[in-house]
Image: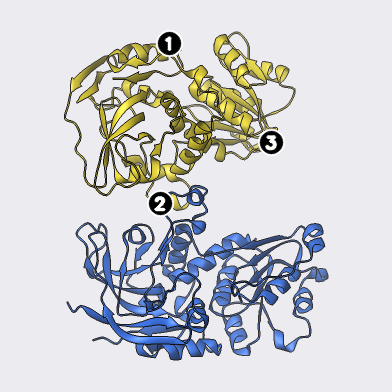
Chain colours: A blue, B yellow
Amino acid sequence: MKSKMRAQLFYGPKDIRFEDIDIPLTGNDEVLVKIKSALTCGSDLKTYKRGHPTMIKKASVFGHEWAGDIVETGCEVDGFKVGDRVVAVNSVPCFNCYYCKLGRYSLCENIKYNNGAYAEYIKIPPNILKKNAYKIPDDIDYKEAALLEPLACVVHGIEESCIKAGNKIAINGAGPIGLMFIAVAKLEGATVISLDLSDERLEYARHFGADYTINVTKVDDQIKAVKSLTEGERGVDVAIDATGIPRVWEMAILMGRKGAIINLFGGCMPDTSINIDTGLVHYSELTIKGVYHHAPRHVKKSFDLITSKRIDASKFITADIPLEKLITALELMDQQKGIKYNIVASSL
Amino acid sequence: MKALLCYSQDEFKLEEIDRPGILEDEMLIEMLYTGLCGSDIVKIMDPEVKKPAVFGHEVVGRVVETGKNVTEFKKGDIVVTAHHIPCYRCHYCLHGNHSMCRHFKETNIYPGSFCQYIRLSGEHIKYTTFKVPSDLNPVEALFIEPLACCIRAMDRIAFRKNDVFSVVGTGVIGMLFVQLIKSSGGKVVAIDLDDERLSLARTLGAEHILNPSNKKVTGEIKKIAAEFIDVAILTVTNKNTLSDALSYIRDGGTASIFGASGKESRFEVDLENIYKRELTIMSSYSATPESLRRAFDIVTGKKLKISPLLSDVLPLSDFKKGLGLMMKRKIYKAVFKL
């Protein structure tokens, strides 16, 4: 087997280079995967535009939503073999630290991330392989399977939103994450109000099941617009932010009814803060929560949603773009065109 | 090495067997103390369990050899361990039913704890083994695994502060439950046939004690506990204790089956009673790494009184004597060393 591969490397904000690098060497308990599909994620766009605070260092591979074929397995690998179509998420908790013992796996202190989907090959480290990797059924495409990780985050977000059938909920933002929230919230029996500033995205939102859409550029007051869609203008049962914009976090809090759950899901720029009316939180008994990442149970549920086709993963993928044109895909995302792009390395 | 082989329910021999070898992820501990658990007695007494065998799973030991990949512990460390490990990826694990996991049921320490040296796998080292701090009597560390089983049982019950629990059976598990319930903000009615044990239960925090030898439990319990019984914890499970519990717990209450019931496990259920009164029959099996961690913190933090449950440590060669004392309820837990 050859020793070099093509990969997109992050050097700094707006500095991504397409280079030849070494194919990762796999240990006895690891497997090497030839990537057949890598999906763009909003956080990759954030990395491209402003760098990543912790995870993505200079001159490193990035991208973390992928599916592919196993081409090499270490001698101690159990349950996977060369030729298996496989998908895995980008991390695994240690199951051993204080937070894992509390069952708060997404807060694991020893979480190990696995990045590098924008390349020809990626290796799966042993614990991800053991706890957070799945074989892809024959009737599921690689690109559909590659939705596993972002959908797992959304499954976690939905779990924390405690939606009850019949609830009316507001989802701020109709980017890839917002749209997945809409699709899963519909499965939970919610009536969904989707807000965005792009008509194209709101069209997608309706497609994924939003009952109401609000183009925030076309209303004077989006909070009022949401409340007017609820009985007695009392506000929604659950308000979710999927934008990562502090001002929208503030508005999401104001969209809830008394006793509402406010799920501030979208990660904002570092060192930003929001203002909250303390009286409102107190007298309205609001539950305001942050949600990050996923735990293995969310990954399994995400896998079941995709493989049972209760979530049609293919509908989240707008187009195929070759690996060498990754920047084109990121620029399209920045212009809020399309949902997710399927980055494909040309077969060599 | 020396190992206690159980040939039948009353035949035990201390014999020489091969000392286990270890691989690079594993380690070998030398048993310092091992405890006899009720579940060991069930296995010893059950003619269908294959024998001869080395039983036992409650162990505190000293690390004597570590594989080259073991970084968490070093030679000389005093450690406590537990025997089952969930896979963390099967349907059961992902639903929080870790002790129903197939891997959980298959994993064990080798060859058992009633012997001189015990091999711990890499998974045991990672998930269920803890270093015993120097200020803790290592014998008390033997109570971490049983306490973890009690913690898991409490986790599975919906209860609130000031709820009243009956603890049926004041053996070692019952005494741990009494203290756990007290530290969780509950109240306790301890029930046993032994007045001496009941008096200890009271010392450990039980508000009420009840010896039902000559009385009907249901009537007595209503007399002594003015409040309702919200939860019955059955550390002794049989048709009488369960049927009593289902009659004396309040409407909407819970009966938790903790103890193994052995062969006589069938009992008639009054479905109408369960339906109309919204009763819950709950159960809990074994401990998980999560509850072990909390049990470790509780025991090493000295939050429970364990010393009243201790008796003289016996040599493993006196196993039969220890078994007899425990079965006759002369001691709470038989603890052995070599």
Amino acid type indicated by mark 2: Tyr
Towards the viewer: A226 or B25: B25
> Mark 1 falls within which chain?
B
Look at label 1 and name its amino acid. Lys
Dot 3 or dot 1, earlier in sequence? 3
Mark with earlier residue (1, 2): 2
Of the numbered discs 3 and 2, the one sitting upstream in the chain is 2
Decide which of B172, A17 is in the foreground and name it.
A17
Is residue B272 or residue B40 the one in the foreground?
A: B40
Where residue B271 sits: x, y (%)?
Answer: 59, 34
Work out which residue is located at the far top of the displayed protein and give it: B214
Q: How many numbered discs sit on the rendered protein?
A: 3
Q: Quadrant of residue B156?
A: top right
In the picture of the structure, the residue carrying the numbered disc 1 is: B328
Q: Which residue is mark 2?
A: B88
Crowding around mark 3 (Cα neighbors within 10 Å: few <14, some 14 to 19, many 20+) is: few
Q: For the residue carrying disc 1, how many other residues have a C-alpha within 10 Å: few (<14), some (14-19), or many (20+)?
A: few
Name the residue rendered at 33%, 80% in the picture: A119
Residues at discs 3 and 1 both on one chain: yes
Q: Position of residue A29 (x, y in %)?
A: 26, 59
**Which element carries disc 2, helix, strand or loop?**
loop
Chain letter behind tag 3: B
Q: Which residue is mark 3?
A: B161
Residue kind at label 3, given as amino acid type: Lys
